[in-house]
Image (cartoon, grey):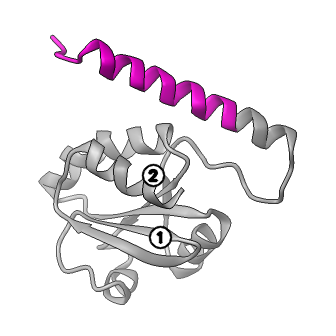
């Protein structure tokens, strides 16, 4: 059984409502920025990566590998962040995109990098709890 406290559930409901409201406001006023997708964007190649960085203000990039156990453990967290934050979430398979991994000096997986206005601002290696990633994202929104 889940041990979530009532306060955690209330905070999650508030976050969902804020996101829904923000989405409605974005739909009403077209400011040219793309709406943030609620699922991770899988990119393949530098051009798709650059397009994602230029399309969204805040982007969380998950450098991962199919063979990586910790990456698989992190998958539900990454999907949750994509669905519940105003940051776009991008997934990069390091085996299929070795040049991108080299460009950003990814030495271990999972590596999550946060980009704000196209610039790398934070990098975390290894698995952390969802609240750590969420707090980091909130600093740049």
Q: Which residue is mark 2?
A: 138
Q: Which residue is mark 1?
A: 115
Query: Residue placed at 31% from the left, 22% from the top?
Result: 8
| Residue 71 forms part of the magenta stretch | no
Q: Which portion, as a residue range, is magenta?
A: 1-22
- The image quadrant that residue 33 belongs to is bottom right
Query: Residue placed at 82% from the left, 59% from the top?
Result: 32
The relative height of residue 11 versus residue 89 in the rendered view (above or below) is above
The location of residue 92, given as percent across then percent down, is 39, 66
From the image, which quarter does the N terminus lie in?
A: top left
The relative height of residue 30 versus residue 16 in the rendered view (above or below) is below
Q: CA distance from mark 2 to mark 1?
A: 12 Å
The location of residue 3, given as percent across then percent down, is 16, 16
| Residue 9 forms part of the magenta stretch | yes
For label 2, the SS is helix
From the image, which quarter does the C terminus lie in?
A: bottom right
In this rendering, which labeled residue sits more in front, label 2 or label 1? 2
Which of 101 and 97 lies nearest the eye of the viewer? 101
Query: Residue placed at 86% from the left, 38% from the top?
Result: 28
Tell me, yes or no, whether the two marked residues, 2 and 1, touch with CB atoms within 8 Å: no
Q: Which mark is residue 84?
A: none
The relative height of residue 28 versus residue 69 in the rendered view (above or below) is above
The relative height of residue 78 versus residue 10 in the rendered view (above or below) is below
4 sits to left or right of 47: left
């Amino acid at each position: 059984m889940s041990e979530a406290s009532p306060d955690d559930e209330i905070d999650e409901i508030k976050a969902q409502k804020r996101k829904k409201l923000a989405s409605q406001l974005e739909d009403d006023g077209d400011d040219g920025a793309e709406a943030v997708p609620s699922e991770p964007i899988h990119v393949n190649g530098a051009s798709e990566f650059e397009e994602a960085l230029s399309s969204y203000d805040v982007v969380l990039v998950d450098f991962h590998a199919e063979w990586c156990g910790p990456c698989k453990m992190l998958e539900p967290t990454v999907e949750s962040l994509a669905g519940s934050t105003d940051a776009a979430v991008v997934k990069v398979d390091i085996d299929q995109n070795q040049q991108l991994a080299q460009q950003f000096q990814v030495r271990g997986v999972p590596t999550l990098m946060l980009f704000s206005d196209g610039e790398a601002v934070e990098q975390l290696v290894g698995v952390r709890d969802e609240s750590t990633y969420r707090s980091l994202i909130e600093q740049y929104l």
